[in-house]
Amino acid sequence: MLRTLAATAFLSQASALASAASSPTADAQWGHYFSLWANDATASPQAVERFYASRVNYYGREMTNADVYRDKLYLMRLWPIRAYNVAPGTVVTSCSEDNSRCQVTLVLNFLSENPARGIGVQGETTVSLALVRENGEMKIERENGVPLVRSSCRLTGPNWRVSSNWRCSAFHFPPLPIS
């Protein structure tokens, strides 16, 4: 709960991080935010409600924050082991003059595994967040991203915690979405 509250405070201070380029502080703070979603104990309906606006454009679909939680819950069940890391130097934040709206883009490295199914994925994706002030707090109004590289993995040994027991395909570049 404390980690969730700390991240909520971070979103509220997002406009204070407005800059044209990445900084170690912004990288670390956004890295902390994404690590929350890699931790089932802090991913909750209340956390989604704190982070997301009441209506969200979530990867091209209009949703309520309850719908966003259901999607995140589905992904947590599909990929029970997750690691998300913000690529250093990739965070770019810009805010409106009155700090009521902010745009954040970054590159996220990910590793997701499902040991029970013997599968995993790893790669990099862009993440684009539009933040808006709602009831005095910064909330995510839009979340989108484009995969940059991706690799599928298969568990080949009994212990999923041993990295040598995973065999991954060569990275490939997913097709870009057609606009």
Image (cartoon, helix red, strand yellow):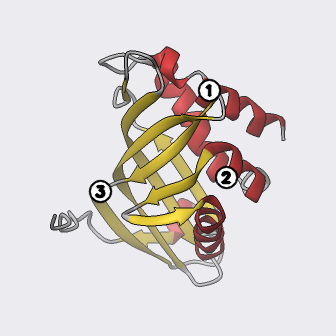
Give the numbered dot on residue 71. none
Residue at the (36%, 16%) spot, across then down: 19
Disc tally is: 3
Mark in front: 2 vs 3: 2
Residue carrying label 2: 48
Residue carrying label 3: 146
Give coordinates of residue 24: x percent, y percent.
46, 18
Per the image, label 3 sits on a secondary structure element best described as loop
**Which quarter of the figure is the N terminus placed in?**
top right
Q: Is residue 66 left or right of residue 164?
A: right
CB contact under 8 Å: marks 2 and 1: no
Residue at the (56%, 68%) spot, across then down: 113
Name the image quarter holding residue 157.
bottom right
Q: Nearer the viewer, residue 135 or 50?
A: 135
Neighbor class of circle 1 (other Cα within 10 Å; few <14, some 14-19, many 20+) is some
* Image height of 9 relative to 173, above or below: above
Q: Amino acid at mark 3?
A: Val
Instruction: Report how far apart the C-alphas of labels 2 and 1 lie in the structure.
Output: 14 Å
CB contact under 8 Å: marks 3 and 1: no
Q: Is residue 3 left or right of residue 71?
A: right
Q: Amino acid at mark 2?
A: Val
Label located before the other in sequence (2 or 1): 1
Name the image quarter holding residue 4.
top right
Residue at the (49%, 20%) spot, across then down: 15
Q: Is residue 95 left or right of residue 100?
A: left
Give the numbered dot on residue 12. 1
Residue at the (72%, 49%) spot, across then down: 47
